Image (spheres, rainbow, N blue to C red):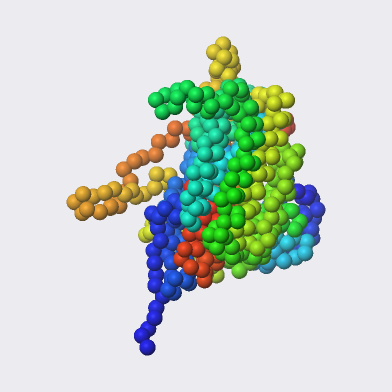
Amino acid sequence: MTDTTSLTKKLTEYFNDTISGYHVDREQITLVASPPNLLKICQALRDEEDFLFSQLMDLCGVDYSAYGQVDWATRKTTATGYSRGRNQSQTEMDADKRFAVVYHLLSIKHNHRLRVRCYLSDENPLIPSVTEIWSSANWYEREAFDMFGILFEGHPDLRRLLTDYGFIGHPFRKDFPLEGKVEVRYDPEQKRVVYQPVTITNRVLVPRVIRDDNRYIEDEELPDA
Amino acid sequence: MPEIRNMTMNFGPQHPAAHGVLRLILEMDGEVIQRVDPHIGLLHRGTEKLAESKPFNQSIGYMDRLDYVSMMCNEHAYVMAIEKLLGITAPLRAQYIRVMYAEITRILNHLMWLGAHGLDIGAMTIFLYCFREREDLMDCYEAVSGTRMHATYFRPGGVYRDLPETMATYKPSKWHSEDEVKRLNSNREGSLLDFIESFTERFPGCIDEYETLLTDNRIWKQRTVGIGVVSKDRALQLGFTGPMLRGSGVEWDLRKKQPYEVYHEMDFDIPVGTHGDCYDRYLVRVEEMRQSNRIIKQCVDWLKKNPGPVILDDHKLNPPTREEMKDDMESLIHHFKLFTEGYCVPEGEVYVPVEHPKGEFGIYLISDGANKPYRVKIRAPGFAHLASMHEMVKGHMLADVVAVIGTQDIVFGEIDR
């Protein structure tokens, strides 16, 4: 794969102030775009000679509302071993950035990959659809709508895709319970399958914990014991 | 004149040619398809959500169950994504083992595809031929992981165990006499690598047999030539990858273009089609099996000469051996911590694609630094392929729908996730 620095340079030169930012992490470039500029940026990414991202590989929603939250919090112990779990109140949710739509693009011509991320607010998760630019976006957007309730403006046929007929809610949101809300069973009296509220409860066997593993921290960043 | 309306027909979800639980709403004008609306999600298990609730390692097993005919390739992407976040690389021997098994899996997948696709459009014998060879490859799975399908063999930092020195053998029974068993066991005397080597020597002949049955077969050609034609531009637009893209004449293979593991050491070719119809995609897949066979052979040669570790010696990520655990307190603690809490992965996000038998299989992994992933998105190749159903079958006959489902190599485990 060609190196990321030249592409980063071209991207920043071309987009300049249309993008809200970019970062390179583990040799992968992420552009941050705002919804009003999205279509313009995507069109340029597909058609400009320097980019030619002819394929939309993946499109997915992300719900950032529980980012960095843990079930169990303590402090660190030694400088060489595992630290204790991190405190819970490290990241507060930003209501304007609750959701994100992430696009993964591939340029066959230049052998580049690019990630474009668009943050959306909690109360108004609305974003323009890119189906006109890449046909493959059609089902991916339907899926993101189904799972996260993100609305794609201009999508030709925004229906639910994966969930049951008549399903209520958006299951991949962090506030949707893992075990769901309804279950089905066969009712011998009515002689058909009926819905009822779930009877199982979720047992968390392994608590979610964040340890700032000291091997990945630079020496000066280490907090005091 | 009486008013003539199109007829709406339901296909599936239980239909032997639907390759699982596909429900199609077909709008037809006589025998000709006007509109197709696939209804999917009948096998939706919420793998991505489940993965968020479990430590990283416990989801490897879920990956097997996505595309359940190419198990280890799914694991491969997931494991490489974790490795990339952790910033580790597997030992060289482990990389060769992974590549070998990824190619064995490719053959497994293509054999299943060839058999089922043949059966769908009227070729019976090919199914039995393909399953004969699949059996041997399943035995290879069993030899390293103990299971024939859901292996959970790849781990972050390597593979679970080294290749075994012996193969399981058949025993005489009231169905198999001594002589017969002796014949069946003839290539199972040595190690697993010997067994795989004997397979690679035999397999090109087997592919010739399949081709004798199909490639010039008049009925096969009538059912596949000119069916479901996709042009180069449309294939790119629709997000096609793998044999579907190569069948349309785009020379693109991640193993060559963005090589991972030890694929850059391997000598193999990428077959490319010209017309973009079902027949070309058939030829591409058959040739891919031959190329995979070549890669396996190269891996076997290397692995025979180069013993070594197959997993990183880092007990923060991999469990210590049972022996170590029994008399070393530190190892016991590591073992306990790994199997209760798992390991924490540094904050960040990666997208790691692999060249899966069906196309580009990618894992987009976001970690917030916890012992469980924050978000896992699985980019399944079949999802994009099935989404193009309407475009591929519009104007074709009803029977061609089955041919197109076959050529797309649909498996619902990965589409519904």
Position in image of residue B332 (x %, y %): 55, 18
Is A118 left or right of B62, judged from the image as shown? right
A46 up-or-down from A200: above or below: below
Position in image of residue A26 (x %, y %): 71, 43
User: Closer to the camera, B11 or A72?
Assistant: B11
Position in image of residue A167 (x %, y %): 38, 57
Residue pictured at 43% horizontal, 44% vertical: A178
B161 up-or-down from B242: above or below: above
Is B158 left or right of B51, judged from the image as shown? right
A19 up-or-down from B323: above or below: below
User: Closer to the camera, B135 or B159?
Assistant: B135
> Which residue occupies the extreme bottom position in the image?
B1
Question: Toward which corner of the image does residue B350 lie, by quadrant?
Answer: top right
Position in image of residue B294 (x %, y %): 69, 40
> Which residue occupies the extreme left position in the image?
A189
Residue pictured at 43% horizontal, 35% vertical: A204
Residue pictured at 52% horizontal, 36% vertical: B135
B176 up-or-down from B277: above or below: above
Q: Is residue A91 visible?
A: no
> Which residue occupies the extreme front position in the image?
B179
Residue pictured at 49% horizontal, 62% vertical: B401
User: Closer to the camera, A171 or B64?
Assistant: B64
User: Closer to the camera, B334 or B290?
Assistant: B290
Q: Quadrant of the C terminus of chain A?
A: top right
Q: How many marks?
A: 0
Q: Is residue A200 visible?
A: yes
